[in-house]
Image: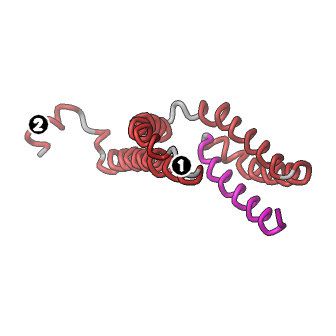
Amino acid sequence: MSGDIMNGLLRLSARVYGGMLLLYPLDLRREFGPEMGELFGEDLMDGWRSSGFAGVLRVWWCAVCEVLRVAIPGQRTNPAFVVPAIAFVFSLLAQCGPLLSIRHALAQESSTSVLLVVLCALVLPSVVTAMTAVVVVHIGKVRVVSLGLSSLDDRTLCSKSAI
């Protein structure tokens, strides 16, 4: 792999990892986020120098495992994280049926075509669903606070005078 491709791969990896840091709880990101990003970049360079692409893949494997062990469990009480995660999983499960039904049609296609179909038919709708859930949770927080609904009791909300 040429130096330009390697540098592009490392830059892309750093950007993706920066996005993955959003999965960590806010307090952890604030305290350690910059150092985590810097260390990840150093690990990528070391992995590349020692083993090439296989070394980069090992660094990524460790990063993904850490997200699963630390970031995801750390967010289990955050509705802004849990609601989109649940929406993503259910959307992913709902997409499995259509994906399986077109599997036979793709049997003669190249692996690139199959990957493209998987991304378009399965992952993309799930990501859109999760992002929609993020927006809904965020709007819900903003609207409830900005309208002052938290200070109203049930009787006021249900009476004709509330209209």
**Magenta-drawn stretch contains 69:** no
Q: Is residue 10 part of the magenta span, yes or no?
A: yes
Residue 159: numbered disc? 2
Q: Are marks 2 and 1 in contact (CB under 8 Å)?
A: no
Mark before the other along the chain sequence, 2 or 1: 1
- Give the farthest residue toward the left: 160
Q: Is residue 55 left or right of residue 22?
A: right
Front residue of 54/81: it is 54
Residue at 69% across / 60% down in the picture? 12
Residue type at mark 2? Ser
* Tag shown at residue 114: 1
Coloring scheme of the render?
secondary structure
What's under tag 1, amino acid-wise?
Answer: Val
Where is residue 122? Give x, y as percent. Answer: 46, 44
Using a 10 Å C-alpha cutoff, classify the residue at mark 1 as few (fewer than 14 neighbours), some (14 to 19) or many (20 or more): some
**Residue found 61% across the figure and 33% down from its top:** 74
**Badge 2, how many Cα within 10 Å: few under 14, some, many 20+?**
few
Q: Position of residue 158 (x, y in %)?
A: 14, 35
Badge number at residue 13: none
| Magenta range | 1-24
* Residue 67 on image: x %, y %: 66, 38
Q: State the quadrant of the N terminus.
A: bottom right
The chief SS type of the magenta part is helix
Name the side, left or right, on which 59 lies relative to 16.
Answer: right
